[in-house]
Amino acid sequence: MGTLTKSGIIDEIVLSTGLSRKEASEGIETFIDIIKANLSETEPVSISGFGKWKVREKTARRGRNPKTAQEITITPRRVVTFSLSNVLRSKLTSKG
């Protein structure tokens, strides 16, 4: 099984629900837009049984270019982190 893409998710929704491809696509696009809008406002997004996305501030720090070994300053930035829910974590770890 390869990487699941947005198109693959839409196909699965179509097969599972009987919705048209257009309806499934619009639903997924709306879902993604809601998540992006909340994260851009630095609001966390939590889906019960799945996980939580949140925006984290990273401060400026010293780093090193691995090719040249030259020291550089890494600029402050925002990153998105994802934490698994305990339900999903236990499902993933019990499969091993």
Image (cartoon, grey):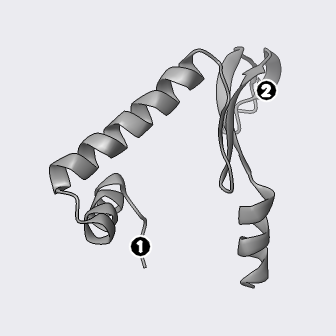
Residue 35, percent from left and from top: 51, 32
- The amino acid sitting under disc 2 is Gly
- The extreme bottom residue here reads 96
78 sits to left or right of 18: right
Could you say which is closer to the camera, residue 50 or residue 65? 50
Image quarter (top left, top right, bottom left or bottom right) of the N terminus: bottom left
Three-letter code, disc 1? Gly
> Would you call the spot at circle 1 few (<14 residues within 10 Å), some (14-19), or many (20 or more)?
few
In the rendered view of the protein, which quadrant contains the C terminus? bottom right
Query: CB of mark 1 within 8 Å of CB of mark 2?
Result: no
Q: Is residue 67 above or below residue 10?
A: above
Toward the viewer: 58 or 30?
30
Task: Name which residue lies at 36% across and 35% down.
Answer: 30
Q: Residue 9 placed where, x, y %?
A: 36, 60
User: Dot 2: within a 10 Å radius of its alpha carbon, few (fewer than 14), some, or many (20 or more) residues?
Assistant: few
Provide the secondary structure element on which disc 2 rests: strand
The picture places residue 49, in percent across and down from the top left corner, at 68, 56
The residue located at (66%, 28%) in the rendering is: 79
Residue 2 is marked as 1
Residue for point 65% across, 32% down = 80
Above or below, 70 against 81 in this view is: above
* Tag in front: 1 or 2: 1
Q: Residue at point 67% right, 18% down? A: 77
Q: Earlier in the sequence, mark 1 or mark 2?
A: 1
* Residue at image mark 2: 63
Describe the element under mark 1 as helix, strand or loop: loop
Q: Alpha-carbon distance for marks 1 and 2? A: 35 Å
Left or right, 49 with reference to 40 = right
